[in-house]
Amino acid sequence: MQETNQNPFSNGTNDNSAHQNAARISLKVIGVGGAGNNAVELMLKDKYPNIEFIVANTDAQALTKNSCSKKIALGSKDSRGLGAGSDPDVGKKRANESSREIEDNLKGSDVVILTAGFGGGTGTGATPVIAQIAKNVGALTIAVITTPAKYEGKKKLNIALREIEVLKKSVDAYIVISNQKLDELFGEFPIEDAYKASNNSLKTTIIAIHDILYRTGKINIDYADVRKILDDSGLAVVALGTASGKDRAEKAINKAFANNLYTYNFQGAKRFLVNIQHDAKATGRDMSKAMDTIRQHLGVDEDDEDVDIIFGHETIPDVSEYFKVSIVAAGVDGKVTEQDNSNKVQPDFAATLNKEVEKIDVVETFRGFDVFEDNQEVERRARTYDKQATTSEINNYVNFEETQANENNEQKANDNKEKSGLWFDV
């Protein structure tokens, strides 16, 4: 197993040069479609000086409401900014119509992170187009996307899974966050808090990559290291955890892997970036135990020479009993499915949710539930729920409507049989 900068207390990279290298890295985060725009809105509140944020949408009204200063209205003037109508082909077309503007905004980027929700129109259709443009200008291109919950309809989920196959051809690495897993873990929470968890997962993924690129310490992970691990790596996992007190290293790593919204098995990765921030009392034994715990979670054999781990660490002054770990595992031997690869949410996660994530003041509106299955015509509707409604309540409501629809269809079929003389009471 190759392990770069293995000794956590060697001299490592000169801090001044590391800061200079970091200052030259251009990192752009582009939120595509409604979910991507919301993720950027959340991150803008934290004011990351090293990140340039961009939002792109086919919906002109949504762009107007977003506080991001750089906006790309996808589509020609003829499209009039009316959205993509939940059609990925329209999203793709609008992005292609704006390819020149997209390229102008992404030129000079070293790293481009795209974030979007898959299953609808703009995020699903436009993200692969924008990703390909990012790769064409020479940027390391990473996508962080969400897939729909079950209650949003089978059709929407199938669209998301199908278009992920398109996306992965246009990016170096991609991370998939499941809103179905969100429902499994937070179904009894108010839906506003559940969606905070989803947005926080997007945000955490981007923060972890940001910290790996820009945090500098005794051992530094530089841009070349990040590029080496993530270039054409495919499906990836990003985990971030913080803990204090006794056994804080192990607790931080366990928390990083417990609080995830992945549905794919993330064991089998061969390339890793691990960055640790810690108090001044951290020991070499702490680092060793931390790496052992990470390997256990990811199913990595420490004697496997094909595994490449790049390790960095930084001492945070003026803090006590502190341990934070950022992990990127690339080349995961997994497949994105609708199945839940669940692990139980840690008890303290719900308690800290409101502290970790600032409230987004929006009315939660759910659009486009599929009342019927398969290829039958679906009724598109918009429903606005009370902010205290839980995802379980919405699931129950949708299931009730589907039952009602099936009963109505059965009654209509029976009525038609009776009228045609084909009805026999057995």
Image: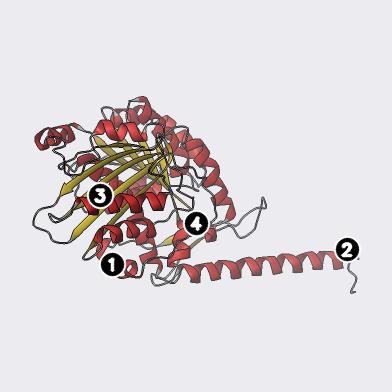
Q: Nearer the viewer, mark 1 or mark 3?
A: 1
Which of pointers 2 and 3 indicates the residue nearer the eye?
3
Q: Given the image, on which type of amino acid does mark 3 rest?
A: Ser
- Kindly state the secondary structure of the residue where label 2 is placed: loop
Disc 4 from disc 2: Cα separation: 50 Å
Which numbered circle lies on residue 67?
A: 3
Image quadrant containing the C terminus: bottom right
- Residue 314 shows up from this direction: yes
Q: Which residue is mark 1?
A: 352
- Percent from the top left, x then y, of residue 90? 50, 38
| Mark 1 / mark 2, whichever is N-terminal | 1
Q: CA distance from mark 1 to mark 4?
A: 23 Å
Where residue 213 sits, quadrant-wise, is top left
**Mark found first going from the N terminus, 1 or 3:** 3
Q: Earlier in the sequence, mark 2 or mark 3?
A: 3
Would you place residue 133 above or below residue 370 in this image? Answer: above
Label 4 element class: loop
Whether pointer 1 and pointer 4 mark residues with C-beta atoms closer than 8 Å, the reply is no
Q: Is residue 147 above or below residue 304?
A: below
Helix, strand or loop at disc 1?
helix
Residue on which disc 2 sits: 420
- Compared with 230, 190 (above or below) is below
CB under 8 Å between callouts 1 and 2? Answer: no
The answer to whether residue 418 is left or right of residue 110 is: right
Crowding near the residue tagged with mark 2, few <14, some 14–19, many ≥20 C-alpha atoms within 10 Å: few
Q: Amino acid at mark 1?
A: Thr
Badge 1 density bin: few <14, some 14–19, many ≥20, Cα 10 Å: few
Mark whose residue sits in front, 4 or 3: 4
Q: Which residue is mark 4?
A: 341
Closer-to-camera residue (352/296):
296
- Front residue of 220 and 61: 220
